[in-house]
Image: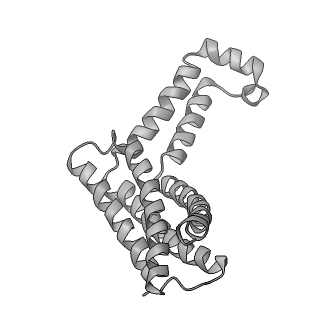
Amino acid sequence: MKLSIKIGIGFAVLWMLFSLTLLGLGISREGFTVGIFTNVFFLLCAIALGLYLSRRKDGFQETIGLDDFKTAMQSGIIYTVFIALFVYAYHEYIDTSIRDYLYEDAMSKAIAAVPDTETFEQLQAEDSTWKRKSYDDYIENAQDKANTFGASAFVAMMHLAGLVFFSFFYSFFVTLVLRKIVLR
């Protein structure tokens, strides 16, 4: 197995342990945002270390930039896939408190925006979407949206999409830094 892939897997496991530690300490919901920032930082570390150690293993031989970018992306994508799978399993089977929190937060915002039937009547006057619907339809629609955005699969897909974007950006950035500054 390539060294860059091992590094990606290693950092993914490290983040999983960090996430499970937050759960064990009972601060998984409060640490959700910290976990996301730590996740992005570990992705950067996996890409940078994976590329650097792979180049060092090869004796820092002269290569084209796309080879370095490919090596960096290997670390990033394997990290991303492992994290997305873990996030799905974590939110679906291990700790549902974050999913429940996202649902409750979305519902409280929807109800705060339209707390009663009088406010709903004002919404009907402003938005033709709600003309022929009742306040109960509005609440049901809010529940459907909250269930969708709080679902484990949705959270995992957002992690996947975000980490793929960051993998691409970090791989490009780390390749530039390594080639233009570190290996001058």
Q: In this view, does 109 lie to the left or right of 124?
A: left
Above-or-below relation of 166 to 58: above
Q: Position of residue 119 (x, y in %)?
A: 63, 14
**Which residue does the image show at 48% across and 46% down from the upper left?**
150
Q: In this view, does 22 lie above or below 74?
A: above
Q: Which residue is painted at 56% across and 55% down in the image?
A: 162
Which quadrant is the N terminus positioned in? bottom left
Color style of the picture:
one colour
Between 178 and 123, the one nearer to me in the picture: 178
Is 51 drawn above or below residue 128 in the view shown? below
The picture places residue 44, in percent across and down from the top left corner, at: 48, 60
Q: Residue 23: image x %, image y %?
A: 26, 50
Residue lying at the far top in this picture: please name it.
Answer: 118
Q: Quadrant of residue 5?
A: bottom left
Q: Place residue 61 in its image quadrant.
A: bottom right
In this rendering, position of residue 24 left or right of residue 15: left
Task: State the residue at coordinates (48%, 67%).
Answer: 48
Percent position of residue 184, x then y:
58, 71
Number of marks in the rendered image: 0
Residue at far front of view = 184
In this rendering, the answer to whether 174 lies above or below 51 is above
Q: Which of 141 and 181 is in front in this view?
A: 181
Q: Nearer the viewer, residue 12 or 129?
A: 12
Q: Which residue is drawn at 49% across and 52% down?
A: 155
Q: Residue furthest left?
A: 25
**Depth check, front residue: 169 or 102:** 169
